[in-house]
Image (tube, rainbow, N blue to C red):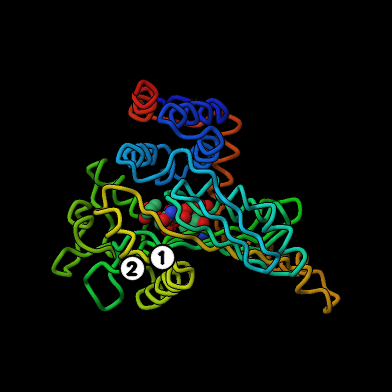
Amino acid sequence: MAEPHRISHDDLLTRIETIFTRAGVRADSAKAVARVIAAGERDNCKSHGIYRIEGCLRVLAAGKVEPDAVPELHDSGTAVIEVDARGGFANPAFYAARQALADRARKTGIAALVIRDCLHFSALWHDVEALAEDGLASLSMCPSYAFVAPAGGKEPLLGTNPIAFGWPRPGAHPYVFDFATSVAARGEIELHRRAGKPIPEGWAVDRDGQPTTDPEVALNGAMLTFGGHKGSAISTMVELLAGAMLGEFMSKEALDFMGGASLLPRHGALILALDPHVFAARSGRDPIAEGEKLLTAIGAQGARLPSERRFAARERALRDGIPLTDAELAQLDRFEAM
Ligand code: NDP
Ligand code: PYC
């Protein structure tokens, strides 16, 4: 097999940023969006790496995301901070509110960030990792599009509804998990379709509710939740907390609003930030040290922690460059020339 091309993280970041500014996106937003896409490639999370550029450009061209939206922060001093993305991308909205969220969580122990009306295409680990860098535990979630059937049903009703958790660790990468509540992210199925590869059994059913390994059929049928009824309930919780509770779209409404699955979804997002030291203060114990006992014991069994693969990929990419295929480089060239 031919050796992949290598590109430095900084070069990739600049190229993606250029693509978005040329597409009319405000400079700060282009930077924030490029940061999460380049990080996806750097960490070998292909389903939310440069593959997503095409989708973002499509929504821009359709006029369904505001390229020059300036996120509007609403902080009335309570535990709930809001940032209105004003129909723009979710990533700049998160960065506009990150400091206020972290400061409030340190003060009160727990704070919530509500992101309103954003176009959300990215992985969630980026946000919870940033909050772990701030010394905070966090839980992030959002609806997406109604692609997933509830356990026992066959009609798509739930989104792929990702949920991510971050916990700070001293001198080490944080403990982070981040996954779709469907068996796999939709992006993974799309990547299988493009590669002409079948998907594993158990990921999806066809329109009649019959199991399928054909990615095309899966994309037109219904995806399945992980862990049967358990994933179905967690996914429903995400719809309720990050959709209904916020007064923002749930996945079915998001799909109807966009008029089909060819455009990325617009909805809200919820991020809870917690300061472990505030919670543990009266116990006299150090919550981070206590957490370390568990996390090191997991590693001592030879079990890997979530995100370990990602952090190892990051280390390799920062040392050797990010591997890209001919097709991926050609895609970047094409987008830059647009
Ligand atoms: P994966 O199944 O690829 O990974 C899920 C998590 O489990 C990762 O933290 C991963 O760590 C960890 N993990 C995987 N294998 C193991 C193992 N053997 N032992 C321990 N931990 C393990 O994620 P998904 O395909 O479900 O989701 C991919 C991305 O899609 C997520 O980042 C999610 O946020 C995003 N997404 C975004 C949506 C949106 O609307 N914006 C909708 C749906 C998904 P590691 O990375 O190190 O392997
Ligand atoms: O991969 O399921 C997915 C997804 C939907 C929106 C962004 N990513």
Q: Which residue is at 27% across, 60% downward?
A: 256
Mark 1 residue CB less than 8 A from any atom of ligand 1: yes
| Outermost residue to the left | 208
Q: Position of residue 233 (x, y in %)?
A: 40, 77
What amino acid is found at the position of numbered circle 1 in the picture? Answer: Thr
Q: Which residue is at 42% across, 50% downward?
A: 119
The residue that label 2 is drawn on is 158
The residue that label 1 is drawn on is 181
Q: Which residue is at 41% across, 65% downward?
A: 181
Q: What is the crowding at mark 2: few (fewer than 14 residues within 10 Å), some, or many (at least 20)?
A: many
Q: Position of residue 258 (x, y in %)?
A: 29, 53
What amino acid is found at the position of numbered circle 2 in the picture? Answer: Leu
For marks 2 and 1, give the one nearer the viewer.
2
Q: Is residue 8 above or below residue 144?
A: above
Q: Give the left or right position of residue 190, taking residue 32 as reference.
A: left
Mark 2 residue CB less than 8 A from any atom of ligand 1: no
| Outermost residue to the right | 284
Quadrant containing the C terminus is top left
Q: What is the crowding at mark 1: few (fewer than 14 residues within 10 Å), some, or many (at least 20)?
A: many
Quadrant containing the N terminus is top left
Label 2 and label 1: CA atoms lie apart by 9 Å
271 or 226: which is nearer to us? 271
Q: Give the left or right position of residue 106, taking residue 205 as reference.
A: right
Q: Position of residue 50 (x, y in %)?
A: 41, 37
Q: Give the left or right position of residue 112, taking residue 161 as reference.
A: right
- The answer to the question of whether label 2 and label 1 lie on touching residues, with beta carbons closer than 8 A, is yes
Which callout, 2 or 1, points at the residue further toward the start of the chain? 2
Element type at mark 2 = loop
Element type at mark 1 = loop
Q: Is residue 114 above or below residue 198?
A: below
Q: Is residue 40 above or below residue 128?
A: above
